[in-house]
Image (cartoon, rainbow, N blue to C red):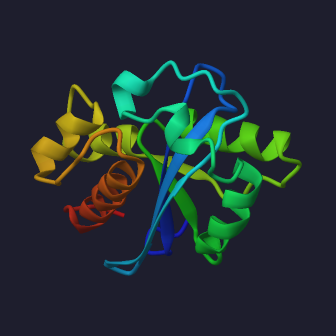
Amino acid sequence: MDPAAPFVAIDFETADYPPDSACSVGMVRVEGRRVVAREHRLIRPPRPAFAFTDIHGLRWEDVREEPAFRDVWRAVRPLLDGAGFLAAHNASFDSRVLRTCCELSRLRPPEIGFVCTVALARRTWGIYPTKLPDVCRRLRIPLRHHDALSDAEACARIVMASRAAPGGG
């Protein structure tokens, strides 16, 4: 994986426990040392059940008229063109949501790998605990936690900071 390659940071918010319940996605594309594109979309999940409103503030009423994942992904997918990797905080969660939503929508998941900014923050700066607000505080990155676009931008800035760190990729 080319450490100088363009990349896209991504964050999903989910409505309930199964990984097919994406209700919001934020994506930030970085080329060189610059953020060149930002996208935020609300998504109508497959069920009206919302277990995480207290975390992200979204309710069924906020997304019931929004497009389903299939249509949202088709609109934002071009952000990945030419990207070397996807970045996410706790990448196993976001990669599972993306893979599950793509599969259930009969879309091909992206064939690029994920970089986990949790692992990156631990490896680069020895940050513990490594929750996104902790890393952002340490690196002085603004954050509105559980806002998908803010979380994605924070992940992008973590990767950018790691590239600028001594010995960084």
Q: Specify the quadrant that holds the C terminus.
A: bottom left
Q: Quadrant of residue 35?
A: bottom left
Residue 9 picture location, percent across and down: 46, 58
- At horizontal 83% and vertical 39% (from top left) the residue drawn is 104
**Residue 14 in view in this figure:** no
In this image, 154 relative to 92: left or right?
left
- At horizontal 32% and vertical 79% (from top left) the residue drawn is 34
Q: Quadrant of residue 50?
A: top right
| Pick the front one: 135 or 62 | 62
Residue 3 picture location, percent across and down: 45, 68
Is 123 drawn above or below residue 129 in the view shown? Answer: below
- At horizontal 83% and vertical 42% (from top left) the residue drawn is 103
Residue 116 picture location, percent across and down: 45, 44
- At horizontal 65% and vertical 76% (from top left) the residue drawn is 81
Residue 19 picture location, percent across and down: 65, 29
| Pick the front one: 134 or 143 | 143
Is 17 drawn above or below residue 92 in the view shown? Answer: above
In this image, 35 relative to 133: left or right?
right
Q: Specify the quadrant that holds the N terminus.
A: bottom right
In this image, 146 relative to 26: left or right?
left
